[in-house]
Image: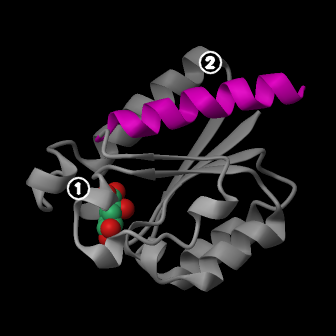
Amino acid sequence: ARILLLNGPNLNMLGAREPQHYGSFSLATIEQNLQQLAQKCGVNLECFQANSEEKLINKIHQSFQHVDFIIINPAAYTHTSVALRDALLAVNIPFVEVHLSNIHKRESFRHHSYFSDVAEGVICGLGAKGYEYGLDFAVQFLANKA
Ligand code: DQA
């Protein structure tokens, strides 16, 4: 199985960025950890981060018929991007939405997501562990489908 981990804008700053919300792990550490988990589960994982909507959308388009599942933290685009939502619907790849922080505990503009109603599931507020839970879910989901 082929799984894609997508991280949106400013998540390259993890570790340094508002640690009270996002924890102290860098994105590199999170990605390395997830790669190890993917290897144990026997799935292929690609990790991609971008700060622009265009790069994220292009990556999703390139995944069409090449990726079986997407784990995505759209970051601030969660609350703004119809285009990113439409890209996921266009390629019709099942996905889980992950947020490090509990977006419902924060400013009201973070409470709405353009992704949640079309995601297989949403994980938020569980920190970097949320990505591991997302990968675990993806592996089960794909095993049940096969
Ligand atoms: C985030 C939450 C978003 O509201 C914020 O814009 C982010 C990160 C999270 O992982 O908690 O950049 O997606």
Q: Amino acid at mark 2?
A: Cys
Q: Residue drawn at (82%, 52%), measured in percent from left and top?
A: 66
- Look at the magenta stretch and give its main secondary structure: helix
For disc 2, the marked residue is 41
> x, y (%) of residue 35?
49, 31
Let me know if residue 29 appears in the view: yes
In the image, taking residue 21 as reference, residue 30 lies left or right, namely right
Q: Secondary structure at mark 2?
A: helix
In the image, taking residue 10 as reference, residue 92 lies left or right, namely right
Q: Mark 1: few, some, or many residues within 10 Å (few <14, many ≥20)?
A: some
Q: Residue drawn at (67%, 19%), measured in percent from left and top?
A: 42
Real-space Cα separation, disc 1 to disc 2, in angstroms:
26 Å
For disc 1, the marked residue is 14
In this rendering, is residue 89 above or below 109? above
> x, y (%) of residue 36?
47, 24
State the quadrant of the C terminus. Answer: top right
> x, y (%) of residue 49?
45, 62
Let me know if residue 43 appears in the view: no
- Front one among 54 and 92: 92
Q: Count the marks: how many?
A: 2
Q: Which residues are magenta?
A: 127-146
